[in-house]
Amino acid sequence: MNNQDSAARAAFDPLTAETGGLTSDLNLDVILDVPVTLSLEVGRARIPIRNLLQLNQGSVVELERAAGEPLDLYVNGTLIAQGEVVVVNDRFGVRLTDVVSPAERIKRLR
């Protein structure tokens, strides 16, 4: 008898929030206390190792981003917003000027 003839198609119950499926009624409370890494990127530069080894105190590294352009805000390596540097009580902060929509953030995760 051929294995293809005796194989039956598997049947599964529909996925629900209780069984691990994704629904619009997900309870996000279970992940709200999970820490994530937030980082701000002022700009990037690509330089040869020869130039890297010549860097010392007072050296200037030119970035590809122009002065006045917004910073990129990443959470766990995923861009979620752009903003500008502010000073709050003698500490640096960032004021968000453009936030990536939740739908777009989810798309970028896949």
Image: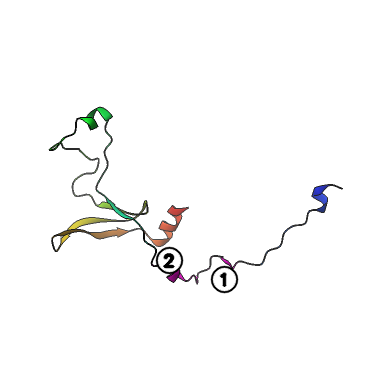
- Among the two numbered marks 1 and 2 on one chain, the one whose residue lies closer to the N terminus: 1
Give the left or right position of residue 6, taking residue 100 as reference.
right
The kind of residue on which mark 2 rests is: Ile
Q: Which mark is residue 31?
A: 2
Magenta region includes residue 28? yes
**82 shown above or below 55:** below
> Label 2's element?
loop
Q: Residue furthest top?
A: 50
At 84% from the left and 47% from the top, the residue drawn is 2
Q: Which residue is mark 1?
A: 18
- From the top left corner, tell me how far across and down residue 97 is, in percent: 26, 59
In front of the other: 53 or 18: 53
Classified by dominant secondary structure, the portion drawn in magenta counts as loop
At 30% from the left and 53% from the top, the residue drawn is 39
Measured Cα–Cα span from mark 1 to mark 2: 16 Å
- From the top left corner, tell me how far across and down residue 21 is, in percent: 56, 65
- Residue range in magenta is 14-33
- From the top left corner, tell me how far across and down residue 23 is, in percent: 53, 68
**48 shown above or below 41:** above
Using the rendered view, name the quadrant where residue 73 is placed.
bottom left
The kind of residue on which mark 1 rests is: Glu
At 24% from the left and 32% from the top, the residue drawn is 52
Magenta region includes residue 29? yes
The crowd level at tag 1 (other Cα within 10 Å; few <14, some 14-19, many 20+) is: few
CB under 8 Å between callouts 1 and 2?
no
Give the left or right position of residue 88, taking residue 15 as reference.
left
- From the top left corner, tell me how far across and down residue 55 is, in percent: 19, 33
